[in-house]
Amino acid sequence: MSELIRQLNKLTADEFIDDEGEAYRAKLLPGLNAEELAALVTQMPIATLPPEVTELLCYSKGLLFGWLEEIRFDAFSDFGRRGLFPACIELAHDGTGNYWVLDINKAGEWGAVFYVCHDPAVIIRQANNLLDFLGQVQEYGRFKSTSWFDEVYERLSFKIWKERKTHTGLVEATTAVASSDDVLSVFAAQQLPEFLFGDLRAKSVTQGFAYDRFLQGEQIRKHELEPLWALVPLRKSWISKLFGW
C-alpha cells in the first residue's frame, strides 16, 4: 500500500467538528474503472501516470470533505488560465472561484500543489506534493485556524496582495539572467527583457506572488519542468495612467 493511500485512510478514519459543532468524517469516493483510467492517461503530457498515482486512482478518485465538498484526484485541466498551469489536476475549489491545483510538468511528473486565489489575485505554493496536501487537509480538519491550510486561505493570500507594490515576489530579467541558479538564468535568457519571473520552486524563498498585472495566454510562459513562470506586465492605457487606475 502506497503512502498516498495510507494518508488517505488516516484522513478518512479521523473525526472532525464543523463550525456548527457537528461531528463529521471525510468520505472516500470510488476508484476509477479501467476505461476511466485509460481516458485520464490519454490526457497526460506523456500519456502515462506515476505508478503511485495509478494505484491511488484505482483505490479512490477523491473524497468528500467538509466545506470543500469534493477533493478530486482525476480532474485534469489546463486550468482555464492558459500559461499558468498548462497541465494540472484541479484538486478542489471553494465555490467562489478559488482553486487548489496540482502541477503536472511536461515530463508527466505530479508536483507541488498551489492555491490560486482570484480575489485577491494571488498564487501560493500550498504543498510540496499530493501527500503533503492531504496531510494539510487533515490538519485543517483538526485545528482549523492554527493550520497551514487556514493560514494560506485566510491570511497569507491577503498579506501577499497588500505587499505587492513594495515586494512583488517577482524577479526582474536582468537579475534572473545573472543568477547563479542555472535553471532560473537559462530560463530567463530565453525570454524577452521586459519579462518578470515568478519562482515557486521548493528552494525558493518566495511563497507566492500576485498575478493581477499580467496578461493571459502568450504573455505567461511556464518552465517545462519547474513551477517557474515568465510574465509580462499589463501595459496601461493612457487613460489608466491619467487617473491612476
Image (cartoon, helix red, strand yellow):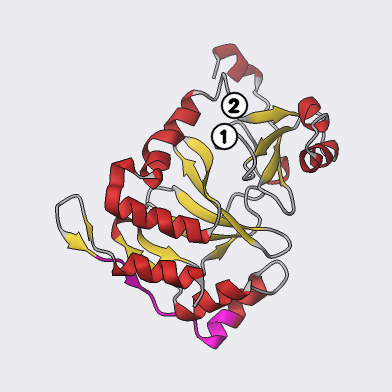
Which residue position holds label 1?
209
Residue 86, how many percent across, how many down? 66, 55
Which residue position holds label 2?
168
Task: Give left or right: position of 114 versus 45.
Answer: left
Q: Identify the residue at image location x=47%, y=24%.
A: 162
The single residue placed furthest to the left in the displayed view is 21
The single residue placed furthest to the top in the displayed view is 242
The single residue placed furthest to the bottom in the displayed view is 34
Q: Amino acid at mark 2?
A: Thr
Q: Are marks 1 and 2 in contact (CB under 8 Å)?
A: yes
Residue 197, how many percent across, how many down? 70, 35
Q: Identify the residue at image location x=80%, y=42%.
A: 187
The residue carrying pointer 1 sits among few (fewer than 14), some (14 to 19) or many (20 or more) residues within 10 Å by Cα, namely: many
Q: Compared to 41, does 189 lie above or below?
A: above
Viewer-side residue, 238 vs 45: 45
Q: Quadrant of the C terminus?
A: top right
The residue carrying pointer 2 sits among few (fewer than 14), some (14 to 19) or many (20 or more) residues within 10 Å by Cα, namely: some
Task: Give left or right: position of 148 versus 52.
Answer: left
Indicate yes or no whether the magenta region holds residue 36.
Answer: yes
Q: Secondary structure at mark 1?
A: strand
The part of the chain drawn in magenta is 25-37
Indicate yes or no whether the magenta region holds residue 129.
Answer: no
Q: Compared to 33, does 226 lie above or below?
A: above
Pick whichever of labels 1 and 2 is earlier in the sequence. Answer: 2
Q: CA distance from mark 1 to mark 2?
A: 6 Å
Residue 90 appears in view = no
Q: Identify the residue at image location x=69%, y=65%.
A: 108
Q: Amino acid at mark 1?
A: Phe
